[in-house]
Image (cartoon, grey):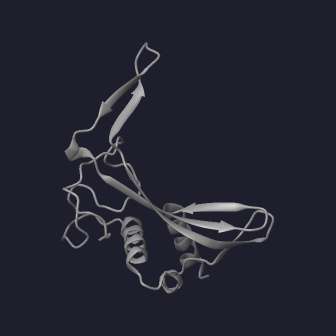
Amino acid sequence: MMARAAQAEPATGHNHPPDHEHLHSHLHDGQKAGQPGAQRDDNALLADALMDGFDGAEDKASFLRMARIPQHLHAADGSALRLVDVELRYAYQVATASPAFSAEELVYLPFPANMIRERATMVFVYVSLRERRDVDLSEMIKLLNEREQGGD
């Protein structure tokens, strides 16, 4: 897995229902990719593999080529956007806040220590002379799947 500090067993949710589709760098409900009978989400496995592989790769440019990450995308005006940055972003949700009923303030609920989990994503930054486009990991996986199905 990631070269980050080990975390305790993840809690479900992240302030949304457990069946909410999202990409994080960890699996929920104690799932392990190799467990027989565990529901397998290919996109989540691909996201984990991309993040972990890139993070650990000594030659990051070669890793991106082998992962078939495009070196350029097309902008709306047809010009080429070139890949210039790959960012790994880590966040920790330490609490939740929501509007209070019949009040002009938030209901703030800090999480106990055992519910605080790392969430990570990857962002690919493409630029041209006129435009910058940040492509997050979920969008990149969709793009890779479309290219694979289209034979590009």
> Among all residues in the image, which is located at the extreme top?
102
For this rendering, which residue is in front, 40 or 111? 111
Question: For residue 65, what is the image quadrant?
Answer: bottom right
For this rendering, which residue is in front, 73 or 8? 8
Q: Which residue is drawn at 44% across and 60% down?
A: 121
Q: Residue at x 63, y 78 (%)?
A: 71
Q: Which residue is drawn at 29% across and 34% down?
A: 110
Q: Locate residue 43, reporting x and y percent.
A: 41, 66
Along the horizontal axis of the image, is 74 left or right of 24?
A: right
- Number of labelled discs? 0
Question: For residue 69, what is the image quadrant?
Answer: bottom right
Along the horizontal axis of the image, is 69 left or right of 46?
A: right
66 to 136, vertically: above or below: below
116 to 119, vertically: above or below: above
Q: Residue at x 33, y 49 (%)?
A: 19
Looking at the rendering, in which quadrant would you find the C terminus?
bottom right
Along the horizontal axis of the image, is 99 left or right of 112?
A: right
Q: Locate residue 92, reporting x and y percent.
A: 35, 49
Q: Locate residue 41, reporting x and y percent.
A: 35, 65
Q: Locate residue 123, reporting x and y percent.
A: 53, 63
> Among all residues in the image, which is located at the extreme right?
77
For this rendering, which residue is in front, 108 or 79? 108
Looking at the rendering, in which quadrant would you find the N terminus?
bottom left
